[in-house]
Image (cartoon, grey):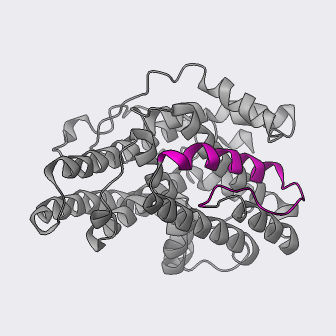
Amino acid sequence: MTEVDTHQSNPDSSAPYDRIGTAQTTGGAAPPPIWCPFPISVHPDVEGLNDDLVAWARNFSLIRSPEHEQQVRRADFGAFVARVHPDAQDLRLLAQWYLSAWLLDDLLDEEDIATGKDATNLIAAELRDQFRVDLEPPSSSILPNPLASACSDLWRRTAPAMSPEWHGRFLSHHRDYIASTVRDAQNYRDRPLDLGNYIRRRRINSWGQSALDLIEVAGREEVHPDVTNSDLHRSLRTVAVDVMSWTNDIFSYRREEAHGNRDNLVAALKASQSLTWREAVQAAIAMTETETENFIRACQDLQNAHPFYNVPPQEWRTVTQNLNAIGCWLAGSLDWHRNSGRYRIDDT
């Protein structure tokens, strides 16, 4: 991984935290910025991306009402994808993937869906059936729900350009995400929070591994399978998923609390360690910054192991580019969370 300029971390240290979820901890004080040393870039095609996303969602009947469309626009998902994939060759395809994941998350957060086991199981089954390596549509003549139809469209537009090895990896990650998200909606919504169990589950239900797979789609370059199948690479991806997931938790905990959902790192820290909300936020920030340091060390460990891999120099450059892209993803996500309207309390 290339050297990063830590002096450029948190360039917007005066970000308007009072406009977003983490601003008003108990007592009204805003938390300090989260340290992230990677550069922030924005894709040049960001303009008009939100309009394209709304049009795509309407085409698949994913926009439920004018109020729902307003929420989607206010979240500014286009700005998020333009920051986490600043060099993507097909930015709109990637943005649609992310929107589909967000819409599933929101769908399962709705009380009538989250508490209905049959409904959530049906959603999971329909989503699962859309992803086939042979790209053949499911044999059932029953039309799937709109979100499943949208995912089928995304898969058929994504898979042909990628290798069978990538297909298997992405499908494994995406199916685990669907299963974990649906299971958690059924089983963990009202249970006492256990920090260790929460961290384990969050690594799966965050969609983080799928997002990391999409980095290869963005650049149309795949990491050599000898690397993706190694423990060194898997471990650094796990650490990166922790950073991206916990960052989201820090910014979203108040919105989720307003929805009655405490399945969140901040809430888990508060419950397990008898902290105040302010203390729990500070603890979550410290964990996130430590895990960012661990990610940097994990990237260095992989780079130092290069002589032990049977990977030509040209293909190893793809490995390095992938690690840098993960760092940019983490920085872009943090930058978006600072300003997005998705986690403002009045949006609940």
Q: Nearer the viewer, residue 70 or 286?
A: 70
**Residue 116, position in %: x, y?**
87, 70
Side of 142 relative to 250 (left or right): right
Q: Quadrant of residue 190?
A: bottom right
**Can you say which quadrant of the picture contains the C terminus?**
top right
- Residue at image point 36% right, 30% down: 41
Q: Residue at coordinates 84% horizontally, 56% vertically from top-left?
A: 144
Q: Position of residue 50 (x, y in %)?
A: 64, 27
Residue 154 lies left or right of residue 30; in this view the side is right
Query: Would you place residue 126 above or below residue 101 in this image?
Result: below
Residue 275 visible? The answer is no
Indicate yes or no whether the magenta region holds residue 21: no
For residue 117, above or below residue 130: below
- Residue shown at the point (50%, 75%) measured from the top left: 200
- Give the residue at x 54% y 68%: 172
Relative placement, left or right, of 336 versus 119 is left
User: From which residue to which does the magenta span run?
Assistant: 133-161
Q: Front-most of 236 and 60?
A: 60
Q: Nearer the viewer, residue 236 or 347?
A: 236
* Total numbered badges shown on the rendered structure: 0
Counting from the top left corner in percent of width and height, residue 111 is at: 84, 61
Asked if the magenta segment contains residue 154, the reply would be yes
Q: Is residue 123 left or right of residue 94?
A: right
Q: In front: 9, or 241?
A: 241
Q: Where residue 250 sits: x, y (%)? A: 51, 54
Q: Report whether residue 76 is seen.
A: yes
